[in-house]
Image (tube, rainbow, N blue to C red):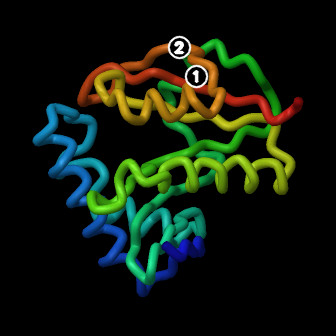
Amino acid sequence: MQIELCKLTDGDIEEAFQLISKVTHIMRRAGINQWDSIYPDRSIVEYDISRSSAYGCYCDSQLAGYIALNDEYPPEYDSIAWIYHGKNLIVHRLAVAVDYQRKGIGTYLMDFAISYAKENKYDSIRLDAYAVNKYSNALYNKLGFNKTGEIVFRTGLFYCYELSLHV
């Protein structure tokens, strides 16, 4: 399997949105209701791409994964007792196409996020994961992220995680 990672552009909006829509459908069928028709919608994908924060992982020329990286965070993050302060990269909307799940794409995208953060001199990486999503929580634990708290969004309870980039 040949893997390529690249920054997404306006021409990738439809493909990226379709990937997220299909992942949302599969998650909801599995009882993971963190995403729905309201979030993330097409305008969120357009926003990620317009801000140059969306990246795609292509496997054999097929979009297999999506991730957005920036320093924007929801106001709910202000209630968390974060461990590391300074410049923090925030991970948003990690999604792996159904046909590529459990093949290392999520790890590949998170390894990219860690490398990106180090290269751009961030102090830590922060993110949240739906409490019911055992797959994403297992991934973040495997990669050494520390659970720093819990927040509630419209669809339920989310765990907040942080990874220090100073070793």
Indicate whether 124 appears above or below 56: above
Closer to the camera in the image, 3 or 132: 3
- Residue placed at 56% from the left, 45% from the top? 91
Q: Is residue 44 left or right of residue 167?
A: left
Mark 2 lies on a secondary structure that is strand
Residue 125 position, x and y percent, is 68, 37
Mark 1 lies on a secondary structure that is helix
Residue matched to label 2: 149
Q: Residues within 10 Å of mark 1 (few under 14, many from 20)?
A: few
Mark toward the start of the polypeptide (2 vs 1): 1
Residue 5 position, x and y percent, is 58, 71
Give the amino acid at mark 1. Answer: Asp
- Residue placed at 46% from the left, 73% from the top? 59
Residue 111 position, x and y percent, is 65, 50
Residue matched to label 1: 78
Closer to the camera in the image, 63 or 9: 63
Q: Is residue 96 left or right of residue 138?
A: left
